[in-house]
Amino acid sequence: MSYDIFLGCVIPARLPFLEASGRKVFEKLGIKLNDIEGFSCCPDPTGIEQIDHKTWLTMGARNLSLSKRGNGSIISFCSGCVETLKGVNYFMNKDNKVKDEINKILKKIGKNYDGKTNVKHFAEVLYENLNKVKENIVKPLEGFKVAIHYGCHYLRPSEIINWDDPFDPITIDEIIKTLGAESIDYDLKMECCGNPVEKSDMDLSLLMIDNKFKSIQQSGANCVALVCPACFQQFDFKQRELNKKNNSNYKIPIFYLSELVALAFGYKPEELGLKFHRVQPKTLLESLQFSAKI
Amino acid sequence: MSVINFKLRNQVIKHNASLSYCYQCSTCSGGCPVALLTQGKYNPRKIIEMAILGLQNKLIKEPNSSIWLCSTCQKCVELCPQKVELTEIFTLLKNKIFEDGKVPEAFLLQGQAILDSGIAIPYSKAIISRREKLGLPEIKTAPIKEIKLLLKETNFENKILKGSK
């Protein structure tokens, strides 16, 4: 099995440690990730799409046209990229006029897109290979009480994402349980993290994540797992900001799903670059007997 | 003053016919996390109502339009009993505001980065060396000439220039 890896912007250019764990996990699973030259920004469904749908479609279609389409087409570690690429497929395949219009533009650079590149989120591929994941676990994540944050764009709009239930999802819960960790339910589990509104109202964005943290603290969880780099920044970067602003004392370690899988596969925290997290997971990892020379 | 502009309404319906299914039940606003936290300053039902009436001045011309507070969480789209595609309709309206040159600065900055480099976040020296330390490959992104050509075709470049003025 092999996929073309679409990295997008936030992960490789700001949070490369998330990419490191992702690549390690898929290597261990024997699923090859092909690096393709020439991808641009997906572009951002909460940014560029909101101001210029046609530019969003055009750049997205150009990216999709670059896939060499091994047996698995495109995989991405980012929920935003997945939403964009699945969305571009949706709009182009729904209306031939749109497809013709975009291809007329792509022709200027000698490209064409037929609407047939399949796109998958990395968590989708992990879920499909849950047995393989299980076989590779050498250090079950005992004691990890995980508050899962699915994030909006992993699930919705369901007509475009076409994966898991938009309000009552199970896939990441199943993966977390397979790793030997516990999934802790919390009141605001399905709420938006607030990252996209940071572009227009920072206070509102902070309020949204503050509410999530309060709910997570009440739940008894000792860490968070998520699958989107925008959510990761919101959860990991904003704790210090909130602590300064509100005199709160949040120190909730935030993990990317791929980092938790990698830890269960026996990778050491220092191999994964966990030291680059703003909220250091060191104390938690040590308390759970994960060597943490980070 | 609110002036009803059916041209705008018809443009929205032509783009997305689901606008006309709305019967103003407010399920969207009831399920919206931003409506709850802003005490209704952001109110998706109301934006749809304004689109049905074609209130161009309020929707497009007013600075600091509340429409930018949408978090694009897409809950409203899932919840709507009439299958109104709210987020798609809001996207069209925001696109029109962009054409008019009035979007929050963060959107323009992202747009400018795409114009300059084809990616939203340029690779800094520190990140390139961190990538090396993590054993990650060098990333070869899109030829900027290709991207610039496409963005000229979609008129994106001019719209960013207009917004930055």
Image (cartoon, coloured by chain):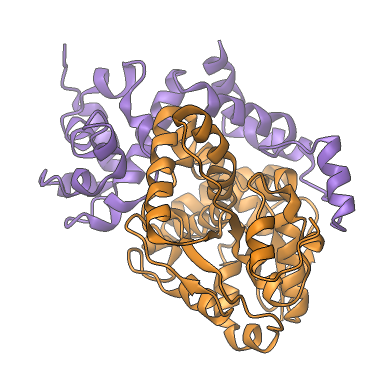
Chain colours: A orange, B purple
Question: Is the residue A34 above or below the residue A276 in the image?
Answer: below
Q: Residue A4 in the image: state x and y as whole percent.
A: 72, 66
Q: Where in the figure is residue B143, as x and y percent of width and height?
A: 79, 42
**In the image as oriented, which residue stretches furthest toward the front?**
A287
Between B122 and A231, the residue placed more toward the observer is A231
Q: In this view, does B76 lie above or below B44?
A: below
Q: In this view, does B7 lie to the left or right of A200?
A: left
Q: Is residue B15 visible?
A: no
Q: In this view, does A217 lie to the left or right of B10?
A: right
Residue at 63%, 47% (x, y): give it: A279
Looking at this view, is A82 or A234 the one in front? A234
What residue is rendered at 89% in x and 52% in y? Answer: B133
| Residue A191 picture location, percent across and down | 36, 52
Residue in the picture at 18% in, 33% down: B46
The reply, left or right, for residue A144 in relation to residue A94 is right
Q: Where is residue A237, by image quadrant?
A: top right
Q: In which quarter of the image is the C terminus of chain B?
A: top right
